[in-house]
Amino acid sequence: MISTPLRLRTEEHYEAHKQSIYRFTDRLFCILMMVQYLGAIIGAILTSPKTWEGNDSAIHPHVWIALLLGAVIALPVCLLTAIYPGRQFTRYAVAVNQMLMGALLIHVSGGRIETHFHVFGSLAFLAFYRDWKIMIPATLTVLADHIFRGVYFPASIYGVTSGAQWRFIEHATWVVFEDVILFASIFKSQQEMHAMAERQAEIEFANEHIEGLVVERTAELRSSEMRKSAVLYNAMDGIVTLDENGKITEMNPAGEVIFGVAQSSVLGRPFGATLIAEQSQELHRQKVSILTREDSVFNAAGRWRCLGQREDGPFEIEISICPVQLESGRIYTAFVRDLSDTCKLEAQLLQAQKMESIGQMATGIAHEINTPNQYIGDNVRFLQDSVHQVLAAIDGYRTIVHQLAEDSSELKQQAEQIETQADLAFIAEEMPEAVAQALEGVERVGNIVRAMKEFSHPGVGGWTEVNLNQIVQSTLTVSRNEWKYAADAELELDPNLPAFSGNSGEIGQAVLNLVVNAAQAIKEKFDNGDKGQIRITTSSDADHVMLTISDNGSGIPENLKMKIFDPFFTTKGVGIGSGQGLPITLNVVQHHQGKISVESTAGEGTQFTLQFPLALADEKDAQEEIAA
């Protein structure tokens, strides 16, 4: 059911449409009436220009009728359509006068049957009004004309002088027949007009509803934009908006504080070249190349750590860049976090973990020191006893020497007896070996203490040349008590492994974390006392040094591989793991512009591969410039 407002709006549009049709058709008939008037005059002149009486001629009455009567018929129509367009009486006047103009044309043509078709055409033209009521006076005008002239002037309408009194019935029948068809067409047209008006009213109501929704949504969007702006400008992290070419288009206040620049000074400048330190620009380009692919998705490159650039020099930051697809193109939003304080805390945590690891290994180290000391003590006691026997033998030899003069043969026998009793041959054979073992024990103690000292010494800010093989050996020595009861360690260290620039303390911590993880994984799998295997290899190529640490422990379940580098994530019990070992290892590798990969099968084992560049990005650029 149509609502009252919709019905009223429909009627307004329906009436407006009808009025536009009435006005248009009025103008059309004004033009048509003038054309017909001129046509009637021209037709009268062409068909009967003059009338003759002997040698005298005059303008034919048809010409005067066309000129004068045509003006009487046409001029009112033109005046009414010009002054009162769209009025009902104007339409009625047009209907009647149009049919009268048809009667005039029929008269001028001498009642030719072809001219009668003008009546049917006029009715069809009147149907343009889409008003069935005006068809009635038009039809009545035609019938009255045919009856009147059929009786009194049959030659004027039928072209015959007699016997045409009843021919109007035939003509009237055809006119009524056309009226029926035109009425049906008019009613159908009116229904369509009404349906169109109703649809237009519905569309307008829908538009008004949509406009209301738009206003409401606009207010909501404005409110949402204000909230987002508040979040943007009050966020603690820096938020930088970039165009599709990586140039800065907006920076929030936190970003200005982090980088120590004003937004106006960096607008339109490349983000990487302006706010990323030279040492990290290669890493930044690699990450951005992932984001600029057409198939990249939200946060496709993840988060990464690198060095930012500000006036006082490089500093540690964490970046996450997300692509945003708009209709006008793709833009990027960079989220930047200042890690200056975090790096200090991580350094403290790293040192604390070292101390914690040293404390956990203290008992094992004491055992390792006690074992060589045991046989050192035994050998020393053996040497002490042997010295007494040697001294006794020497005293005997001295006594014999004093008696040589009496009987040399007897002295010789006594000397041999003394050597036999002292077992000088055994002592001479065992003393060197005992001393060698004592020295070996002392060296082992020295190695253990030396490795502990190297490992526990905190790294300094400046980087040095790193001997990866030495770091691996020292770390295995320090962590021996963690793995020696659970696994056998197999080393395949490249003797020609080149050194590279790095922080030995950080790399040692990363190696220790992986070795301890491997030992713990093996303990989880071999809980029956069997031993597993830890295999460590080093190798190199033209640009990198690689370290691989693999074990045949419990492995990593497939659903946990994506979480192992998350801070504080651990699958071990309370007191066994802190969930910081692998995240710290990842940070160390990234800090050295390296890569870390993991391959693992649950129940079979895990392999970590660390890759360190022989030359850092800034060093490589400098070498290329020198070579160029």
Image: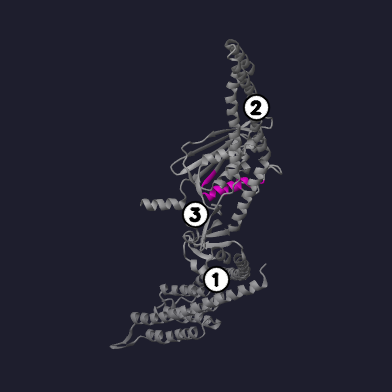
Residue 64 appears in the figure: yes
Crowding near the residue tagged with mark 1, few <14, some 14–19, many ≥20 C-alpha atoms within 10 Å: some
Residue 208 appears left or right of 537? right
Q: Is residue 236 left or right of residue 281?
A: right
Residue displayed at 51% across by 79% down: 23
Question: In terms of depth relative to the viewer, which is nearer, 237 or 385?
Answer: 385
Q: Which residue is mark 3?
A: 280
Q: Which residue corresponds to mark 2?
A: 384
Depth-wise, is mark 2 or mark 1 nearer the camera?
Answer: 2
Q: Secondary structure at mark 2?
A: helix
In this view, 461 is above or below 254: above
Question: How far across and down, in percent of the image, does residue 473 sit?
Answer: 56, 38
Q: In screen coordinates, is 348 left or right of 128?
A: right
At a point 60% along the width and 76% down the height, the residue shown is: 12
| Residue plotted at (36% across, 81% down) | 42
Q: Is residue 604 left or right of residue 575?
A: left
Residue count near mark 3 (Cα–Cα under 10 Å), binned few <14, some 14–19, many ≥20: many
Residue 594 lies within the magenta run: yes
Could you say which disc has been placed on residue 186 in the image?
Answer: 1
Q: Secondary structure at mark 3?
A: helix
Q: Point out the tag, 2 or 1, that comes first from the N-terminus.
A: 1
The residues colored magenta run 578-596
In the rendered structure, which disc, 1 or 3, sits on the residue that comes first in sequence? 1
Rendering quarter of residue 410? top right
Q: Secondary structure at mark 1?
A: helix
